[in-house]
Image (cartoon, rainbow, N blue to C red):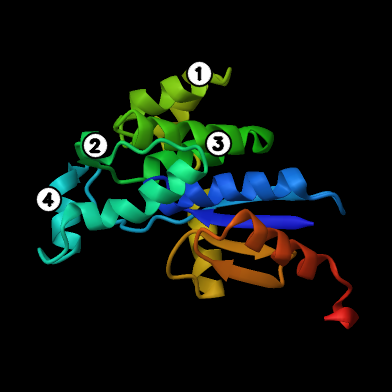
């Protein structure tokens, strides 16, 4: 069964969603599952150098939402899932396109590990994941070819794959992430609980005539 997860690398709920997916798959004992991570850049208007994080978040709430209100939900969900979030240490809101391109260039079997490393860098260590050198180091730490990835990212490497994912998301009518598509026919959004994902997997695994 193919499980597709649409995500953005600066989306805290996507980090929680990936962990919940991992926990669900650890309990799944039916047909084999392959996971494909699909890029979704939530705000392509952010400049390549990024924006001030606090100012960006306050503007997102139109000055009416305190910063803590943005952080409380994913902070609590992350703690329950064993994930650290250090929102108050983050200084830059990145344009996430470069990080998506890096993930698109990685071998498919390493994409999940690399995505986890990108999430960890941004949310737990407050690193700028819009920075080329930060991303290259993350890839090198996983044993990937840093030199080759740097050269490709300095060009347009990975861009067609990201654009194809964005187009697929538009075709499916996806407007927010995380979003999950199971076996091409069971779909749901949000950082579902592991139990919720398992229920979706069971439905997707049934023969069509049984639904």
Whichever of labels 3 and 4 marks the residue nearer the N terminus, that label is: 4
Q: Taking 113 as reference, is 79 left or right?
A: left
Does residue 89 show up?
yes
Residue under label 4, please give it.
55
Q: CA distance from mark 4 to mark 2?
A: 12 Å
Residue under label 3, please give it.
105
Whichever of labels 1 and 4 marks the residue nearer the N terminus, that label is: 4
* Quadrant of the drawing holding the C terminus: bottom right
Asked if 92 appears above or below 140 in the picture, the reply is: below
Asked if 21 appears above or below 166 in the picture, the reply is: above
Q: Secondary structure at mark 2?
A: loop
Residue 196, image x, y percentages: 64, 63
Residue 199, image x, y percentages: 72, 65
Residue 46, image x, y percentages: 24, 52
Kindly identify which numbered label has been placed on residue 90: 2
Whichever of labels 4 and 2 marks the residue nearer the N terminus, that label is: 4
Residue at 63 percent across and 54 percent down: it is 194
Kindly identify which numbered label has been placed on residue 153: none
Residue at 43 percent across and 53 percent down: it is 13
Q: Are marks 4 and 2 in contact (CB under 8 Å)?
A: no
Residue under label 1, please give it.
140
Q: CA distance from mark 1 to mark 2?
A: 23 Å
How would you rate the neighbour count of disc 2 (Cα within 10 Å): few for under 14, some for 14-19, many for 20 or more? some
Q: Are marks 3 and 4 in contact (CB under 8 Å)?
A: no
């Amino acid at each position: 069964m193919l499980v597709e997860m649409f995500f953005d690398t600066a989306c805290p709920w996507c980090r929680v969603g990936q962990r919940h997916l991992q926990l669900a798959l650890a309990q799944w004992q039916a047909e084999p599952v392959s996971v494909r991570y699909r890029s979704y850049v939530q705000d392509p208007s952010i400049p390549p150098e990024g924006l001030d994080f606090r100012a960006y978040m306050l503007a997102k709430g139109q000055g009416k939402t305190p910063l803590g209100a943005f952080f409380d939900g994913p902070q609590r969900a992350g703690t329950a899932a064993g994930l650290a979030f250090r929102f108050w240490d983050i200084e830059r809101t990145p344009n996430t396109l470069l990080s998506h391109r890096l993930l698109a260039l990685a071998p498919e079997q390493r994409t999940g590990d690399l995505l986890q490393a990108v999430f960890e860098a941004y949310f737990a260590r407050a690193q700028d994941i819009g920075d080329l050198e930060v991303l290259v180091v993350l890839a090198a730490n996983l044993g990937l070819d840093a030199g080759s990835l740097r050269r490709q990212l300095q060009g347009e490497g990975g861009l067609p794959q990201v654009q194809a994912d964005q187009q697929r998301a538009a075709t499916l009518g996806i407007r927010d992430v995380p979003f999950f598509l199971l076996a091409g026919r069971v779909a749901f959004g949000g950082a579902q609980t592991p139990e919720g994902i398992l229920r979706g997997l069971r439905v997707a695994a049934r023969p069509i005539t049984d639904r």
